[in-house]
């Protein structure tokens, strides 16, 4: 069924709308999805935009279950935007190109909803890197006048800076390779065999094109450092770390095992020596959450030197860990080791497909229950 849905407070209209279980979903001209409560009383009070970003070769449907859960639990608090500016093979164009597209998409969403005051990101896999790039482009220092969006005055005087004029609340990554995928058993399906990892680094661009180069840290555009290294500081006109610091909380959800796409260490931003010993949880509400840690921010003087025993990839990885540790993180470690579909942990943690990956629903519930409004 196709009909026009109008947002009362924003005055915008979106085609191809649908209603299911009290949740409104509409498809915009560019193909992305907005989801909100169908009750007018709820829609009028919503001021918090949640942007969900999928991973490589993904689509807007990857976050369907989670988006609907957010709106059902927080109907008068959030509107969820499932990005689709970088679907399918467009995810092979590079983290920076995807980040630029996502930044433009977010600005368009904000313009359609002038009542928004807050923004959060929830991103899966490579989508977490794309979101980190996008916020670097969307960041506005305190008191900086906006020349792109008429809503600049929304948070005038905010000492933390803003993301496209909105107060930055939650930045959540789910199984994201923050330290890249090169070497050191970062991609489990390569079995930690150095020869396999070396070959993967040299041919990855043939499979995953520019995005593969960014993940394996083999990019060197015009003599610049690898992009992931650039993203641990404010680089050029991209305020990567200022933007990340602006969020009131940063959270990294990670699979401790059976994720054959993204390893535990790279998704939880830890060194090998920092990986915690976990045990089966006794928490009935979140049975797959096995370890939680609140890591405070460290400056350069507080970061303990770590011995480097391998080649330059270890040196670079250490730089990434150190750089990202300059901001605080909540780290949530997840295990599906007893699941029948445990080898699909990379998708279960997101509930990519409700019929196949529903065991990850407790992770989504944990995300919602701890979400800062």
Image (cartoon, rainbow, N blue to C red):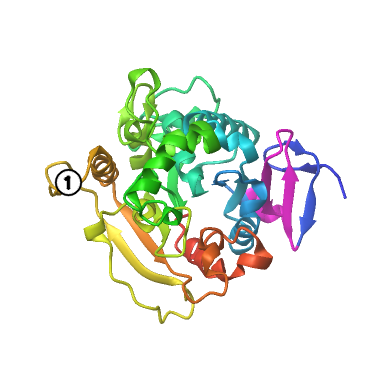
> Looking at the picture, how far across and down is residue 1, in whole percent?
88, 50
Span colored in magenta: 21-44
Q: Quadrant of residue 156?
A: top left
Question: Is 19 displayed left or right of 51 in the figure?
Answer: right
Task: Name which residue lies at 67% across and 45% down.
Answer: 34
Task: Name which residue lies at 44% across and 69% down.
Answer: 335
Disc 1 marks which residue? 308
Q: Nearer the viewer, residue 43 or 29?
A: 29
Task: Name which residue lies at 33% across and 41% down.
Answer: 245
Q: Is residue 36 above or below residue 362?
A: above
Check disc 1 and report its element: helix, strand or loop. Answer: loop
Q: Nearer the viewer, residue 154 or 193?
A: 193
> Looking at the picture, how far across and down is residue 144, in whole percent?
39, 24
Q: Within 10 angstroms of label 1, few (less than 14), some, or many (20 or more) residues?
A: few
Q: Nearer the viewer, residue 298 or 140?
A: 298
> Looking at the picture, how far across and down is residue 295, in whole percent?
27, 56
Residue 87 shows up from this direction = no
């Amino acid at each position: 069924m196709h009909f026009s849905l109008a947002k009362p407070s924003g005055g915008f209209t979106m085609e191809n709308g649908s209603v299911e279980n009290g949740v409104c979903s509409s498809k915009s001209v560019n193909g992305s999805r907005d989801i909100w409560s169908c009750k007018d009383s709820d829609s009028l009070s919503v001021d918090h935009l949640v942007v969900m970003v999928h991973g490589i070769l993904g689509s807007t449907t990857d976050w369907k279950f989670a988006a609907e859960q957010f709106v059902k639990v927080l109907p008068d608090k959030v509107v969820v935007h499932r990005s689709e500016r970088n679907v399918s093979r467009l995810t092979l164009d590079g983290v920076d190109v995807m980040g630029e597209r996502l930044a433009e998409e977010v600005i368009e969403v904000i313009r359609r909803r002038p009542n928004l005051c807050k923004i959060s990101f929830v991103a899966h896999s490579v989508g977490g890197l794309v979101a980190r790039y996008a916020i670097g482009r969307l960041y506005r220092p305190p008191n900086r006048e906006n020349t792109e969006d008429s809503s600049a005055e929304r948070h005038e005087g905010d000492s933390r800076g803003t993301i496209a004029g909105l107060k930055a609340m939650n930045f959540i990554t789910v199984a994201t390779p923050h330290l890249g995928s090169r070497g050191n058993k970062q991609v489990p399906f390569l079995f930690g065999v150095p020869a396999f990892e070396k070959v993967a680094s040299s041919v990855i661009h043939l499979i995953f094109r520019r995005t593969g180069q960014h993940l394996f840290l083999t990019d060197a555009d015009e003599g610049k450092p690898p992009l992931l290294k650039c993203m641990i500081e404010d680089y050029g006109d991209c305020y990567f770390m200022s933007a990340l610091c602006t969020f009131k909380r940063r959270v990294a959800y990670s699979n401790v095992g059976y994720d054959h796409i993204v390893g535990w260490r790279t998704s939880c931003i830890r060194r090998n020596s920092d990986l915690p010993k976990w045990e089966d949880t006794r928490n009935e509400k979140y049975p797959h959450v096995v370890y939680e840690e609140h890591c405070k921010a460290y400056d350069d003087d507080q970061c303990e030197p770590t011995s480097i025993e391998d080649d330059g990839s270890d040196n670079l990885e250490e730089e990434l860990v150190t750089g990202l540790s300059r901001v605080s993180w909540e780290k949530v470690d997840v295990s599906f080791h007893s699941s029948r579909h445990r080898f699909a942990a990379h998708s279960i943690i997101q509930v990519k497909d409700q019929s196949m990956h529903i065991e990850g629903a407790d992770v989504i519930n944990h995300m919602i229950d701890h979400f800062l409004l």
